[in-house]
Amino acid sequence: MEIFDQLDTETNSTLFAELLLPVPIPKLFTYRVPQSLNEKIMVGQRAIVPFGDRKILTGVVVSTHSNPPKDYEAKYIFELLDDFPSVSEIQFKLFQWIADYYLCTIGEVMNAALPSGLKLSSESMVQLNPAFNLEETDYDFSEKERMLLKRLEGESLEYSAISKLLGVKQVYSLLKSLVRKEAIILYEEVKEKYKPRTERRIRLTEAYLAAPTLETLFETLAAKPKQESIVLKYLQDVPVLSHAEQNKHGIARKQLMDDTLSESSLNTLIKNGVLEEFDVIVSRFEEETLPDYHIIQLSEEQHRAQVEILASFKDHNTTLLQGVTGSGKTELYINMIRQALEGGSQVLYLLPEIALTTQIVQRLKKIFGTSMGVYHSKFSDNERVEVWNGILNGRFKFVVGVRSAIFLPFDNLGLIIVDEEHDSSYKQQEPAPRYHARDVAMVMAQLHHAKVLLGSATPAVETYYQALQGKYGYVKLDKRFGEAQLPTLVLADMGRERKQKTIKGEFSGLLLKNIDEALAKKEQVIIFQNRRGYSPMVNCEDCGWVPKCVNCAVSLTYHQYRHALVCHYCGYREALPQHCPTCSSTRIKTVGYGTEKLEEELKFHFPEAHVQRMDLDTTRSKTGYETIIDQFERGETNILVGTQMVTKGLDFDHVSLVGIFNADRMIHFPDFRSYERAFQLITQVSGRAGRRAVAGKVVIQTSSPDHPLLETILKHSFEKFYNDQLADRRMHSYPPFSRLIDVTLKHSDKKICQASATALFELLRTALPGTKILGPGEPMISKIRNQFLMSLLIKIPRGSSELAVLKQALVKCIYQLLKEKEHRNTRVVMDVDPV
Ligand code: ADP
Ligand code: ZN
Ligand code: ZN
């Protein structure tokens, strides 16, 4: 790893350091370096500093110098957390770029970038590291440290509680020392506490470790062959007589017990004190998955694509690989990752949030073994710290991760792959930085002189356009691998079926018949409906009353399993009323189909089938998602119904039918991206069908069977789709022909919110003459969590050289607005390149 030059430190002059702190204030902070740290301090190290009256924070050293700040007295740095830099120069540059481009502070970027376990602060919570054992460690501990460790056995403690407990004000150096000795873990309360994975192990008890006692044991076991064979098997795996020390670690219970051995005999041995059971912590990254990969021969098509990609990298930094679903893009990535790693550089493989499943991780682990790090949002902070440090110390050369993996401390990237590059989960919505990981990846690649491969079956319109223009390289894979064919798509005409009375509930006769046939052939079915809950709406049949959220301007969704009406924006809940509050009628009915209702009706129509639902509600736990996928993969589930979670990256052998329950809502959504989204979702979910020998079929339910978008999808005519979209976007000057900045104003008072929006609009009109500003207007959902919303949309022509200037002017206008008394409490959120 790169170590920065230790900066000139003239020992006779006072040294100051500029620190980047994780706070939303747009500047660096100057601190004094204590004499004792003058020789140690390096750019990129983490430093603990006082902030405000009582707080302490962890910052990162950006530079050192000898100019005292003019208008205040600099406080001292308390302590350095690192011996070497934790943040590299390239990362600083990237963070700064993100802050400038996405209009936020670099402190906000840093806050998003560094896992909270790397940021000791007065807000930290401290827990005992579950893997730590005071008896077995080689480190020495002071009396205070021991006292704290004892207390932590019972509970986690806040920073302030620790300082009270130990009777010292500043406990950071003690905590730093305990973190180094791997005795404690820091976390933020808002996040999940670290729960380690444990494994049940077996070992011989102390008493039988010597040869004589072991002999006696075998004499007594002579009459109990079942128990005897277990002990023999154990000794075979753990030769305690020649290597007594190995007994300490024992072996995994599941490794000891094969089919021939009896569980009840094992339990008897444990009961009799011959063997004992104990739990050990296993690191998630050290599982024994040895690479057992036989190198896949790329098909001729795939090989050609790879040659083309490599050639295009000669004069493009970014190349788009447009490959139909099942064409073997993943195999191609694997090949390219291996090559890059063999060439000695690091590789980052980005995947959308929900596509990063055990399925793909296992596929990759088989090839890259333990040199691969996984960076996932469902991981605890401690696991993120492990990946971060693993890159710094060279353990991980290759990381597969979600969008936030772009913050990791790579120093030598050669290749970044952005899989499913069109996916909107690459864009962070809340809080700042509202960055798009695909776009940041391209900047990151530039800083590293690395290449970017964007992959998708349905590229974003913006990306496709850049490829057409020759700004990106462009390579196509338009056949599925092997015998697999692209699925056949058919429309279920809901209008016609309604007339013919072949509809049951909202299921077309056509879809039901196809499900029936697939099940009869023991094939699997996926049904896609992008609404969770039971019914998206409830209303009174007599007066039309609709229950609305008390905090937001949306109607409440009925969830049957909770017997409640729920707001999907703020989580507000209330019971389903028996009587209409307006007219007292009891005729209150649910309207529309969410995944929960679909699940219920599918079970009713196909009582023999095992139906499983996959949506936010069934996958909240860390393993919920994996369990559902595993069951489906093993064939235990016949019908999987779900939201867009079922559309991503899943690779199953036996899915012959995909049903799209309601295409209309996707198409008619009032947004300039709705066609693009519908096209992508329908194509992606269709891509789950017929990935092997079984031919796939897709049934799309719609009331507008003549819609031109459906026609292009049915014919798999990608080019027509993109050409239509580009013509449309050009006409209305939407991306890629312009850049958008979405400005949202929030206030609990509707009038003030509107007044602020109007005032800002006026300011902008003066400051940005000639720039198109739409609004101010109410967004589709005009109130969320009791905050009223107003929005403005700024359109900047593509290729405008003044982008940075315009952005600065925008920021200035907002400052100016917020200086005025009546607008002071309005919150203004800027979203650059909104999706
Ligand atoms: P995509 O990522 O484009 O959807 P995958 O890489 O998942 O496609 O490939 C689809 C399936 O075909 C996978 O199960 C994969 O293992 C298999 N496959 C693709 N290319 C090859 C190949 N060259 N040899 C053997 N199997 C392949
Ligand atoms: Zn009513
Ligand atoms: Zn709400």
Image (spheres, rainbow, N blue to C red):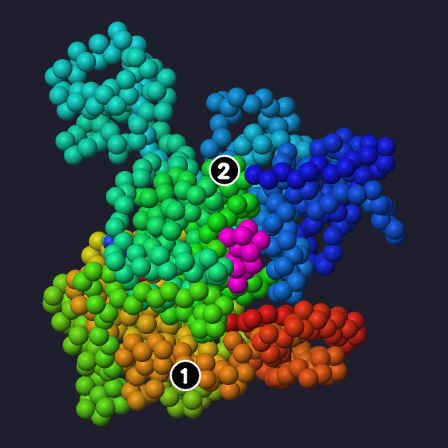
Residue at 37% in and 32% down: 279
* Amino acid type shown at disc 1: Asp
- Asked which secondary structure carries label 1, the reply is helix
Q: Quadrant of residue 226?
A: top left
Disc number placed over residue 394 in the picture, else none: 2
Of 449 and 67, nearer the camera is 449
Residue 777 visible, this angle: yes
Disc number placed over residue 515 in the picture, else none: none
Residue at 75% in and 82% down: 766
Where is residue 410? Give x, y as percent: 53, 46
- Asked which secondary structure carries label 2, the reply is loop
Looking at the image, residue 312 lies above or below residue 748: above
Is the shortest distance between ligand 1 and the CB of mark 2 under 8 Å?
no
Spot the residue most to the top: 212
Q: Quadrant of residue 725?
A: bottom left
The reply, left or right, for residue 441 in relation to residue 120 is: left
Residue at 73% in and 45% down: 63
Looking at the image, residue 692 lies above or below residue 818: above
Specify start and end residues of the magenta stretch as a single range: 439-450
Count of labels shown?
2
The reply, left or right, for residue 349 in relation to residue 20 is: left
